[in-house]
Amino acid sequence: MGGQTDTDTFTSRVVLRKEKGGEAQALHLLEEARLFFAVRPELLSDFRLAVLEACLNALEHGQPPVEVEVEAHRQGDGVHFRVRVIDHGPGFQPEAVPQPQLADKLSSPRKRGWGLVIMRRFSDGLAFESQPGRMVVSLYRIASGS
């Protein structure tokens, strides 16, 4: 991990470890950014879940290295966060991923498959860049009134 900060900007990145719990490294960077700008924890609690899902998906479905970049800057009375999760797998088209159905998931032995729903729900913005050998998921959050 390593970061660069000035009075208005926080930037840091990490390469996630593949072992269990490696995704927590991304949450640590997000927490550093939150503390740097003194943003109240509850303003990012659900966004943390979106970031966690993006990291878990990259670790499970992508190829190493899985990199996470956290950037934040103050603008007006808000702090703008951008988290980029980058892997080097085959990529995917999010619009081709079927929307999970609760009844089907409850009756299925596989309860997973909610990652995109969670990312969309708990981010202020979400963008995908997919090409063979590189997948980038960018998640955005504006924390106002921090």
Image: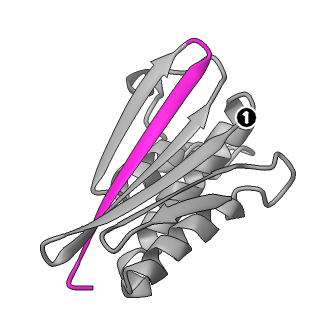
Quarter placement of the N terminus: bottom right
From the viewer's side, name the closer residue of 19 and 97. 19
State the image quarter where residue 138 is shown. top left
Q: Give the side of residue 5 with respect to residue 108, left or right.
A: left
Count of marks placed on residues: 1
Is 57 above or below relative to 61? below
Q: Single out the residue that lies furthest toward the front.
A: 6
Q: Give the side of residue 55 with respect to residue 6, left or right.
A: right
Which range is magenta? 132-146
State the image quarter where residue 85 is shown. top right
Is 126 above or below relative to 118? above
**Is there any visible trace of residue 103 in the rendered image?**
no
Is 40 above or below relative to 129? below
Q: Single out the residue that lies furthest toward the right.
A: 19
Residue 91 in percent (x, y) is at 56, 21
Q: Single out the residue that lies furthest toward the top.
A: 132
Residue 98 in percent (x, y) is at 46, 29
From the viewer's side, name the closer residue of 8 and 38. 8
Name the amino acid, label 1.
Pro
Q: Secondary structure at mark 1?
A: loop
Q: Which residue is mark 1?
A: 65
